[in-house]
């Protein structure tokens, strides 16, 4: 089984592109952090932040394009993909990506100033 689940914050504005027949593809960078702690002997272990590249296709990519911004907290479910490519100098590189199959936005939606449902004081 190849399954990844992440809860993290978007590190920069999503990159959106369109390929064949108006198919949207989004690339986002997600930061996950493990909180630091103190060992019994007093040694401090600092927070550890890891960065993950997440690829979203079609419907999920269009949702990202419209609603996801830098700093938003997301839940991502997907699978690992390993890609190989040549960089600008022709050196062979590998990268690990998460191809999302599900996404939930965990940051509350920002309330708009002209929301008519807001009670007047």
Image (tube, rainbow, N blue to C red):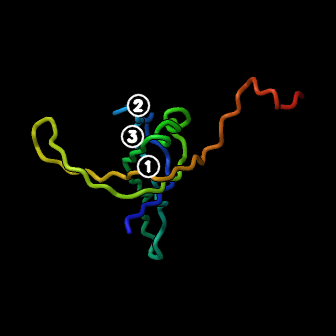
Label count reads 3
Which residue is farthest front? 21
Q: Are marks 1 and 2 in contact (CB under 8 Å)?
A: no
What is the quadrant of the C terminus in the image? Answer: top right
Tell me how far mark 2 sits from mark 3, CA to CA. Answer: 16 Å
Q: Which residue is mark 2?
A: 22
How many residues crowd mark 3 within 10 Å: few (<14), some (14–19), many (20+)?
many
The residue under the point 73% across, 25% down is: 113
Residue 46 as seen in the image, left or right of residue 71: left
Label 1 sits on a secondary structure element that is: strand
Q: Mark 3 and 1 residues: CB-CB less than 8 Å, in contact?
A: no
Q: Which mark is residue 27?
A: 3
> At which x and y percent is residue 61?
46, 39
Judged left or right of residue 83, residue 25 is right
Q: Please report whichever mark, 1 or 2, sits nearer to the chain's N-terminal start.
A: 2
Reply above or below: 6 against 121: below
How many C-alpha atoms fall within 10 Å of the one at disc 2: few (<14), some, or many (≥20)?
few
Sooner in the amino-acid sequence: mark 2 or mark 3: 2
Q: Which residue is the site of mark 1?
A: 31
User: How many residues crowd mark 1 within 10 Å: few (<14), some (14–19), many (20+)?
Assistant: some
């Amino acid at each position: 089984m190849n399954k990844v689940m992440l809860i993290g914050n978007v590190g920069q504005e999503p990159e959106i592109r369109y390929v064949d027949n108006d198919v949207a593809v989004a690339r986002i960078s997600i930061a996950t952090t493990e909180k630091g702690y103190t060992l019994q002997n007093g040694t401090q272990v600092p927070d550890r932040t890891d960065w993950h590249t997440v690829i979203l296709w079609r419907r999920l990519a269009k949702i990202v394009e419209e609603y996801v911004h830098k700093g938003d907290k997301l839940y991502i479910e997907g699978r690992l993909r390993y890609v190989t490519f040549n960089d600008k100098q022709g050196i062979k590189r590998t990268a690990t990506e998460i191809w999302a199959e599900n996404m939930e936005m965990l940051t509350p939606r920002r309330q708009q100033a002209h929301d008519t449902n807001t009670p007047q004081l």
